[in-house]
Amino acid sequence: MDKAAAWLQQSLAYIFSDEQLLRQALTHRSAPGANNERLEFLGDAVLQLVISGLVFENTDNASEGQLSRLRSTLVKDTTLAEVAASLGIGDHLILGPGEKKSGGHRRSSILADALEAVFGAVYLDAGLEGAVSVIRAAYGDRLHELAEFADLRDPKSRLQEYLQGRRMALPEYAVQNVSGKAHQQTFEVICNIPELDVKTYGTGSARRDAEQQAADAMLNKIEGNHG
């Protein structure tokens, strides 16, 4: 754990009093011993609270709906995975042989879960003040470069508004494939606009996430071609 502790001190300026908490936070359920699932559960709640406070601090005139969308943008799995990857948490995960072989240290869901577990572990180790400090450090500039509120509507909503504004039919979404075990499925979804003869694809750990990704890809494609 010395290497992981040094990484945490360098990247997030935090030193655990109880280093076993750090070990547990970095231990995936595929590895023997206490894993990070309970800490992930706690970390998720801590993250929601802390990000709510930080978003409130950083946006003076935002409405409740805008605050909710900002928080959602910052705590969603894809953002968590990006933050975790940028911090290099994958290099310190404790994985079972199967996950090691299949590249689990790069899998977005595992990275996101581990980061939440670290937040939960810090909360147990140092309380809310410590968690605020670590989460603020982890998110860094993301907290100061919050997107314009208009851009925080989810991609499906923005795509629907785009098409309605041009008197076009709404997009069609269909699941193309579902893979993986029941607790760790991956959905592949197609977004189709027959009127434009354009199709895009998205993947995610939930159907809704896959649809949002497909809608985002569609927006990127048609806004450039059909401004």
Image (spheres, rainbow, N blue to C red):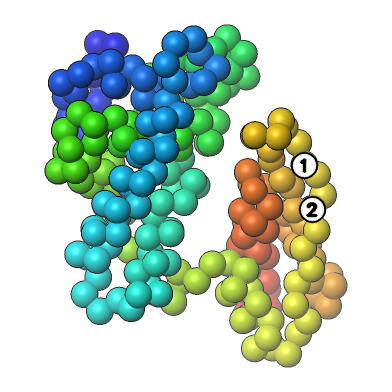
Q: Is residue 96 above or below residue 118?
A: above
Task: Give the residue pinned by disc 2.
Answer: 175
Residue 114 x/y as whole percent: 42, 30
Looking at the image, residue 220 sits to the left or right of residue 129; the answer is: right
Question: Looking at the rendered structure, which numbered label has been put on residue 114?
Answer: none
Task: Give the residue pinned by disc 1.
Answer: 178
Identify residue type, mark 1. Val
Looking at the image, residue 34 sits to the left or right of residue 53; the answer is: right
Looking at the image, residue 51 sits to the left or right of residue 26; the answer is: left
Q: State the image quarter where residue 7 is shown.
A: top left
What crowding class fits label 2: few (fewer than 14 Cα within 10 Å), some (14-19), or many (20 or more)?
A: some
What crowding class fits label 1: few (fewer than 14 Cα within 10 Å), some (14-19), or many (20 or more)?
A: some
Q: Is residue 81 visible from the viewing direction of this image?
A: yes
Residue 48 x/y as whole percent: 35, 52
Q: Is residue 5 above or below residue 133?
A: above
Q: Is residue 91 above or below residue 151?
A: above
Quote the CA–CA distance across marks 2 and 1: 8 Å
Residue sitting nearer the eye, 136 or 52: 52
Residue at (82, 49) in percent of width and height? 176
Residue sitting nearer the eye, 94 or 125: 125
Residue at (28, 15) in percent of width and height? 20
Q: At numbered mark 1, what does the secondary structure look like: helix, strand or loop?
A: strand
Residue at (85, 72) in percent of width and height? 194
Residue 211 x/y as whole percent: 67, 58
Q: At numbered mark 2, what does the secondary structure look like: helix, strand or loop?
A: strand
Identify residue type, mark 2. Val
Q: Is residue 144 visible from the viewing direction of this image?
A: no
Residue 220 x/y as whole percent: 61, 65
Residues at discs 2 and 1 in contact (Cβ within 8 Å)? yes
Residue at (59, 73) in percent of width and height? 157
